[in-house]
Amino acid sequence: MLDQLSWQLQRSGLLTATAKLVAQGEAVATSTAAGTPTELALQRFGHFNGSITRNGAALGNVVLAEITYANGLDRIETLRADCRIDGADPGVAALTGRVEVRFADTVLVQEAIDGDPCELEFGYALPSGESLTFSAHAVYLPRPRIEIAGPQGVQATFDWKAARDPTLGRMCTAILVNDVETY
Protein backbone atom coordinates (compact mmCIF):
# COMPACT_ATOMS: atom_id res chain seq x y z
CA MET A 1 0.00 0.00 0.00
CA LEU A 2 1.17 3.52 -0.70
CA ASP A 3 1.87 5.39 2.52
CA GLN A 4 3.41 8.61 1.21
CA LEU A 5 4.17 10.31 -2.11
CA SER A 6 6.30 13.47 -2.28
CA TRP A 7 8.11 15.62 -4.85
CA GLN A 8 9.68 19.04 -5.27
CA LEU A 9 9.42 21.83 -7.80
CA GLN A 10 12.77 23.46 -8.26
CA ARG A 11 14.71 25.42 -10.85
CA SER A 12 16.48 22.59 -12.70
CA GLY A 13 16.52 18.86 -13.27
CA LEU A 14 13.85 16.26 -13.98
CA LEU A 15 10.75 15.69 -11.88
CA THR A 16 11.38 12.85 -9.44
CA ALA A 17 8.90 11.62 -6.84
CA THR A 18 9.57 9.54 -3.75
CA ALA A 19 7.04 6.85 -2.85
CA LYS A 20 7.01 5.17 0.57
CA LEU A 21 5.25 1.83 0.64
CA VAL A 22 4.05 -0.53 3.35
CA ALA A 23 4.04 -4.24 2.50
CA GLN A 24 3.80 -7.55 4.31
CA GLY A 25 6.56 -9.19 2.35
CA GLU A 26 7.76 -9.86 -1.15
CA ALA A 27 8.27 -12.80 -3.44
CA VAL A 28 10.55 -12.47 -6.45
CA ALA A 29 9.06 -14.22 -9.46
CA THR A 30 11.08 -15.45 -12.42
CA SER A 31 8.14 -15.04 -14.82
CA THR A 32 5.06 -12.87 -15.06
CA ALA A 33 1.44 -14.01 -15.06
CA ALA A 34 0.63 -11.22 -17.53
CA GLY A 35 2.58 -12.78 -20.41
CA THR A 36 5.38 -10.85 -22.04
CA PRO A 37 5.14 -7.22 -20.99
CA THR A 38 5.94 -4.55 -23.54
CA GLU A 39 8.28 -1.73 -22.66
CA LEU A 40 6.68 1.68 -22.30
CA ALA A 41 8.38 4.71 -23.78
CA LEU A 42 9.25 6.88 -20.79
CA GLN A 43 8.65 10.61 -21.02
CA ARG A 44 9.72 12.69 -18.04
CA PHE A 45 8.70 16.16 -17.07
CA GLY A 46 11.44 18.65 -16.37
CA HIS A 47 11.14 21.30 -13.71
CA PHE A 48 11.33 23.94 -16.43
CA ASN A 49 7.99 22.54 -17.70
CA GLY A 50 6.35 23.34 -14.35
CA SER A 51 4.05 26.08 -13.14
CA ILE A 52 2.28 27.04 -9.92
CA THR A 53 -1.01 28.91 -9.73
CA ARG A 54 -2.93 30.31 -6.77
CA ASN A 55 -6.70 30.62 -7.30
CA GLY A 56 -6.15 30.32 -11.06
CA ALA A 57 -3.50 33.06 -11.33
CA ALA A 58 0.24 32.45 -11.75
CA LEU A 59 2.09 32.50 -8.44
CA GLY A 60 5.29 34.42 -9.08
CA ASN A 61 8.65 34.59 -7.35
CA VAL A 62 8.57 30.94 -6.20
CA VAL A 63 12.04 29.70 -5.28
CA LEU A 64 11.11 26.15 -4.21
CA ALA A 65 7.95 24.13 -3.63
CA GLU A 66 7.41 20.73 -1.97
CA ILE A 67 4.28 18.58 -1.99
CA THR A 68 3.62 15.54 0.23
CA TYR A 69 0.51 13.35 0.15
CA ALA A 70 0.33 10.85 3.01
CA ASN A 71 -2.29 8.15 3.60
CA GLY A 72 -1.32 7.86 7.28
CA LEU A 73 -1.19 4.06 7.24
CA ASP A 74 -1.20 2.42 10.66
CA ARG A 75 0.92 -0.75 10.62
CA ILE A 76 -0.57 -3.64 12.57
CA GLU A 77 2.58 -4.96 14.21
CA THR A 78 1.50 -8.11 16.05
CA LEU A 79 3.73 -10.97 17.09
CA ARG A 80 3.80 -13.58 14.35
CA ALA A 81 5.98 -16.59 13.65
CA ASP A 82 6.81 -15.34 10.13
CA CYS A 83 7.95 -11.89 11.42
CA ARG A 84 5.52 -10.07 9.14
CA ILE A 85 3.03 -7.39 10.03
CA ASP A 86 -0.66 -8.33 10.02
CA GLY A 87 -1.43 -5.52 7.59
CA ALA A 88 -1.99 -1.79 7.50
CA ASP A 89 -5.10 0.17 8.35
CA PRO A 90 -5.84 3.36 6.43
CA GLY A 91 -5.47 6.46 8.55
CA VAL A 92 -6.32 10.10 8.01
CA ALA A 93 -4.95 11.36 4.70
CA ALA A 94 -2.87 14.54 4.78
CA LEU A 95 -1.73 16.86 2.02
CA THR A 96 1.02 19.22 3.09
CA GLY A 97 3.79 21.18 1.52
CA ARG A 98 6.10 24.11 1.58
CA VAL A 99 6.39 27.10 -0.73
CA GLU A 100 9.39 29.41 -0.57
CA VAL A 101 8.81 32.73 -2.29
CA ARG A 102 10.99 35.73 -2.85
CA PHE A 103 9.14 38.57 -1.17
CA ALA A 104 7.61 40.85 -3.82
CA ASP A 105 4.17 41.68 -2.40
CA THR A 106 1.94 40.95 0.60
CA VAL A 107 -0.71 38.81 -1.17
CA LEU A 108 0.25 35.46 0.44
CA VAL A 109 1.00 37.07 3.80
CA GLN A 110 -2.41 38.75 3.85
CA GLU A 111 -4.10 35.47 2.91
CA ALA A 112 -2.28 33.77 5.80
CA ILE A 113 -3.33 36.51 8.24
CA ASP A 114 -6.96 36.38 7.05
CA GLY A 115 -7.06 32.57 7.40
CA ASP A 116 -8.89 32.09 4.11
CA PRO A 117 -8.18 28.98 2.03
CA CYS A 118 -6.82 29.20 -1.50
CA GLU A 119 -6.39 26.68 -4.30
CA LEU A 120 -2.82 25.82 -5.26
CA GLU A 121 -2.26 24.06 -8.57
CA PHE A 122 1.06 22.48 -9.50
CA GLY A 123 1.30 21.66 -13.19
CA TYR A 124 3.71 20.32 -15.78
CA ALA A 125 3.21 20.43 -19.55
CA LEU A 126 5.36 19.15 -22.39
CA PRO A 127 5.36 20.77 -25.85
CA SER A 128 4.10 17.44 -27.30
CA GLY A 129 0.82 17.76 -25.33
CA GLU A 130 1.36 15.56 -22.27
CA SER A 131 0.57 17.18 -18.94
CA LEU A 132 0.27 16.49 -15.23
CA THR A 133 -1.79 18.76 -12.99
CA PHE A 134 -2.09 18.39 -9.22
CA SER A 135 -4.62 20.67 -7.51
CA ALA A 136 -4.93 21.17 -3.74
CA HIS A 137 -8.40 22.69 -3.43
CA ALA A 138 -8.48 24.22 0.06
CA VAL A 139 -4.99 25.22 1.21
CA TYR A 140 -4.45 27.07 4.46
CA LEU A 141 -1.28 29.13 4.78
CA PRO A 142 0.35 29.81 8.16
CA ARG A 143 1.65 33.26 9.01
CA PRO A 144 5.31 33.14 7.93
CA ARG A 145 8.36 34.43 9.72
CA ILE A 146 9.91 36.96 7.39
CA GLU A 147 13.58 37.41 8.05
CA ILE A 148 15.73 40.10 6.48
CA ALA A 149 19.04 38.26 6.12
CA GLY A 150 21.06 40.42 3.78
CA PRO A 151 21.34 42.13 0.43
CA GLN A 152 20.10 39.10 -1.60
CA GLY A 153 16.44 39.93 -0.97
CA VAL A 154 13.79 38.74 1.43
CA GLN A 155 12.25 35.26 1.24
CA ALA A 156 9.23 33.89 3.06
CA THR A 157 8.42 30.21 3.64
CA PHE A 158 4.82 28.98 3.89
CA ASP A 159 4.39 25.46 5.35
CA TRP A 160 0.87 24.85 4.09
CA LYS A 161 -1.79 22.24 4.82
CA ALA A 162 -4.72 21.31 2.63
CA ALA A 163 -8.20 20.44 3.80
CA ARG A 164 -11.19 18.78 2.18
CA ASP A 165 -13.00 21.32 0.04
CA PRO A 166 -16.66 21.35 1.17
CA THR A 167 -17.97 22.22 -2.31
CA LEU A 168 -15.97 19.66 -4.31
CA GLY A 169 -16.00 17.01 -1.57
CA ARG A 170 -12.31 16.19 -1.94
CA MET A 171 -8.90 17.47 -0.86
CA CYS A 172 -7.05 17.23 -4.19
CA THR A 173 -7.29 16.24 -7.82
CA ALA A 174 -4.56 14.80 -10.05
CA ILE A 175 -4.99 14.81 -13.84
CA LEU A 176 -2.55 13.06 -16.18
CA VAL A 177 -2.92 13.62 -19.92
CA ASN A 178 -0.96 11.31 -22.23
CA ASP A 179 -1.51 8.84 -25.09
CA VAL A 180 -1.92 5.73 -22.90
CA GLU A 181 -5.54 4.54 -22.97
CA THR A 182 -5.45 2.26 -19.90
CA TYR A 183 -2.99 1.16 -17.26
Image (cartoon, rainbow, N blue to C red):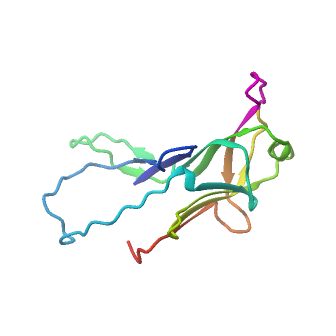
Q: Which one is in front, 25 or 74?
A: 25
Residue in the picture at 24% in, 50% down? 26
Instruction: Residue 104: give x, y in percent of width and height.
Output: 81, 40
Looking at the magenta stretch, what is its main secondary structure? loop
Q: Which one is in front, 162 or 105?
A: 105
Examine the rendering and report whether any part of residue 93 can be seen. no
Instruction: Residue 106: give x, y in percent of width and height.
Output: 85, 42
Residue in the picture at 14% in, 63% down? 31
Residue extending farthest to the top is: 150
Left-right relation of 116 to 13: right
Dividing the image into 4 quarters, which one contains the C terminus?
A: bottom left
Residue 152 within the magenta-colored segment of the rendering = yes
Residue extending farthest to the front is: 127
- The boundaries of the magenta stretch are 145-158
Instruction: Residue 84: give x, y in percent of width and height.
Output: 28, 44
Residue in the picture at 47% in, 49% down? 14
Q: Which one is in front, 120 or 152?
A: 152
Examine the rendering and report whether any part of residue 65 can be seen. yes
Instruction: Residue 143: give x, y in percent of width and height.
Output: 79, 37
Dividing the image into 4 quarters, which one contains the N terminus?
A: bottom left
Q: Quadrant of residue 57?
A: bottom right
Residue 157 within the magenta-colored segment of the rendering = yes
